[in-house]
Image (cartoon, helix red, strand yellow):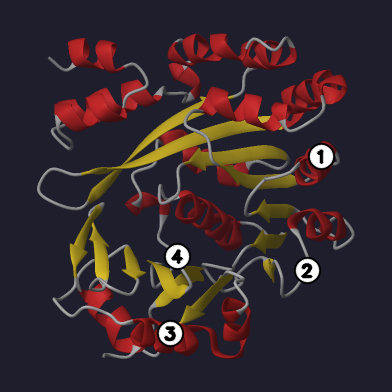
Amino acid sequence: MPSLDAIICAASNAGTSDILIAPGVPIRFRIDGSLEDANDVILTPEDTEALGREACGAEYQKVEQGIEVDLATTFSNGVRCRLNVYRSMGKCCMAIRILASSIPDLDKLGVPPVVYEFQTYQRGIVIVTGETGSGKSTTLAAIIDRINHTRPDHIVTLEDPVEYVYEPDRCSIDQREIGRDTRSFAEGLRAVLRQDPDVILVGEMRDFSTIETALTAAETGHLVFGTLHTQSAPDSIDRLVDVFPEERQQQIRMQLSMTLKAVVSQQLLKKRGGGRVLAAEVMIVNPAIKNLIREGKTPQIANTLATTAELGSITMDRALINLVRSRTITAQDAIAAAHDPDQMRRQVR
């Protein structure tokens, strides 16, 4: 059985985004969104236990107790990965995400032009949403690194785990890992407000304490970046509000209307000829959208996005149509990824 180092090296050379390791099947690589067997060697439970121990070191005792272990590490070949080690039917399994060896430049990600303006924001909240594996962390890392090279600020990140490691340039940067440097996003974020930050990155806005503190940070003059797992920019508003009890939701809508600057919703799609390409919806919050947020009329936001293109807003379906017309993706993939498949079918016919 090859070492974990050797597996990571082979996966990186093959252009793999994720590796799945489980007993009873071969090691599997996810390439351009599809799973492929790395070879025809069936792993035994002993094989996966050994790989788990190699990955976790002393932390493996948690896995033996049925506790999942999240970590990020750089292997001897210079490839940085995020690992989740867990048990399934009592056997050790692993899911490994291969990260870029360096923080990619925004120019290489294919983001909409208005995203370049985020690095100039001085306060407020910017949210990047999308399903797991849609590139949220990569987009945020690229924006944060732009700030690092262009502004004399203090950046504090809260991540679970730390994925991209920044090299401080014009900024001072503190990267805090949940479980190692602070106990939770909520506790870490409350502490951050006493650490003189200018820019705060919250890896995931997952509970009301974190969201509440992020809103407070934005109200008090900080620039806050965060992620959510939603399918569209308007959905993100409802997700943030619905975390709170009903009696507080109007107050949260008011705070969001005053602090939210932009939402980016991402998908990664198969590219013609191989590889993957980013499709992104962008909502730039203007006075009309502020009013819709305050009034709880989020279903109407999608229509407003379609009429505010001059601000840089773009709907997901318009982004998909642009990719089809440039022959970057197929019409079939656009229809499958669209918010309105019937309308998309008519548009790309």
Residue drawn at the location 39% of the way across and 90% of the way down: 76
Where is residue 181 shown, x and y percent of the image?
Answer: 75, 73
The image quadrant where one finds the N terminus is: bottom left
Give the residue number, with chain letter if any, for mark 3.
Answer: 49
Crowding at label 4, few (<14), some or many (≥20) Cα neighbours within 10 Å? many
Q: Which residue is mark 2?
A: 182
Residue 334 screen position, x and y as percent: 24, 28
Amino acid type for the residue under numbered disc 1: Glu
Say what amino acid the circle numbered 4 marks. Ile
Q: CA distance from mark 2 to mark 3?
A: 29 Å
Distance (Cα) linking label 2 and label 1: 18 Å
Identify the residue position indicated by label 4 in the image: 103
* Closer-to-camera residue (183/109): 183
Q: x, y percentage for residue 39?
A: 15, 76
Inter-mark Cα distance, 4 to 3: 32 Å
Asked whether the residues under the numbered discs 4 and 3 touch, taking CB atoms below 8 Å apart as contact, a structural biologist would say: no
Element type where label 1 sits in the image: helix
Q: Amino acid at mark 3?
A: Glu
In primary-sequence order, the first of circles 1 and 3 is: 3
Circle nearer the viewer, 4 or 1: 1
Q: Nearer the viewer, mark 4 or mark 2?
A: 2
Tell me where residue 29 appears, x and y as whole percent: 25, 66
Look at 46% across and 10% down and name the residue there.
307
In primary-sequence order, the first of circles 4 and 2 is: 4
Q: Which residue is mark 1?
A: 212
Q: Earlier in the sequence, mark 2 or mark 1?
A: 2
Quarter of the picture holding the C terminus: top left
Q: Mark 2 belongs to which amino acid?
A: Thr
Q: Secondary structure at mark 2?
A: loop
Label 4 and label 1: CA atoms lie apart by: 29 Å
